[in-house]
Amino acid sequence: MIRRPVCVEDTDALVRLFRSADVAEIGRAETSRADIADLLAAPGLDLARRSQVAIDEGDIHGLVLLHPAPRPGQLRVQLRVDSREGGGEVARMLLALVDQWILQGAETKPVEATVFQLPQALAVPQLVASGWTIVHSYTRMKADLTRFSEAPTTGEAVIRPASSEAEMATVHAVLEEANDGHWNHQRQSFDDFLSDQQHRDGHDPSLWLLAFVADQPAAALIARAPADRAWIAWLGTLPQYRGKGLATELLTTAFTELHRRGHSSVGVDVDTYNETHAGDVYQRAGMTILGTADQWRKTYC
């Protein structure tokens, strides 16, 4: 088994690795090229210094990345190993590399790192053995867009794409207020938020949607539409407008537009324990649950 840094030419091999692991863990292949492109373009990721693939007989058997997490001061690990015999040992080797990177590179301590894994992933026993603990979980959902060929009927809200950078700033402001108080939400300036979104695969300002009630912005949604998949990136309703079905209207409007553009499905990751019952909102809009991934954390002192 040899290791080396990841390069963009590994994309096809990484898609095969992830899709093979998908089949073993959830019974179907879900990972797309857009997913891999997003991983390799994560903000702050240094591919030369903080990425490795494990290769045996020309095949990639595992991947690990380390980059800044959205939460300031926290690091995010991306880890995937295939389902073949020896996957657990690959996970152990790559997690030991994460320990080395963090302990040697941290300017201040303690340092927190997080990683997401499905409960049945081969890496889970190695996470436990390496001192990682589960701190949260997220639910992945999906909608069949072939059901959304007709324009949705809307209630009192007027829904339309943001028509200028000023309205994109309004989308950002609505999402900031709507998500304020969530345990994992970190406020960003509009400039930082916009820069982050522009670096995401499938960024499209015409998929930044606003819902207006009596001419006032009340809810917002951001979708992304890379060539091989569609994704709901952000959704939020201001507290005073909740319970009016605005989130459902935004979602069905986005679904119809994504279907019009040729997409057959759309996905989203939802905080499993969201206090606003976001999972119910997505289900009412026609999305179904695919599975739940656990968030693991390790503190380096």
Image: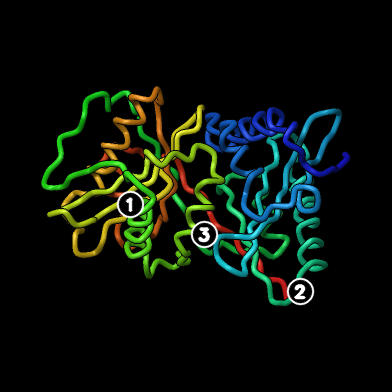
- Dividing the picture into quadrants, the one containing residue 273 is bottom left
Residue in view at x 34 percent, y 48 percent: 221
Left or right of 278? Residue 187 is right
Cα–Cα gap, marks 3 and 2: 24 Å
Residue in view at x 27 percent, y 43 percent: 250
Left or right of 253? Residue 288 is right
Mark count: 3
Is there CB contact under 8 Å for labels 1 and 2? Answer: no
Q: Is any part of residue 184 visible from this angle?
A: no
Question: Which residue carries the number 2 mark?
Answer: 107
Residue in view at x 69 percent, y 32 percent: 11
Nearer to me, 261 or 121: 261
Q: Amino acid at mark 1?
A: Glu
Left or right of 64? Residue 272 is left
Residue 71: x and y, percent? 55, 65
Cα–Cα gap, marks 1 and 3: 16 Å
Closer to viewer: mark 3 or mark 2:
3
Question: Which residue carries the number 3 mark?
Answer: 192
Give the SS element for disc 1.
Answer: helix
Closer to viewer: mark 1 or mark 2:
1
Looking at marks 1 and 3 on the same chain, the residue that comes earlier in the sequence is marked by 1
Residue 89: x and y, percent? 79, 46
Image position of 80 with respect to 106: above or below: above
Q: Amino acid at mark 3?
A: Asp
Give the SS element for disc 2.
Answer: loop
Residue 131 tag number: none
Question: Which residue carries the number 1 mark?
Answer: 167
Left or right of 70? Residue 18 is right
Residue in view at x 26 percent, y 40 percent: 285
Structural crowding at the residue carrying mark 3, measured as other residues with C-alpha within 10 Å and reported as few (<14), some (14–19) or many (≥20): few
Closer to viewer: mark 1 or mark 3:
1
Q: Amino acid at mark 2?
A: Glu
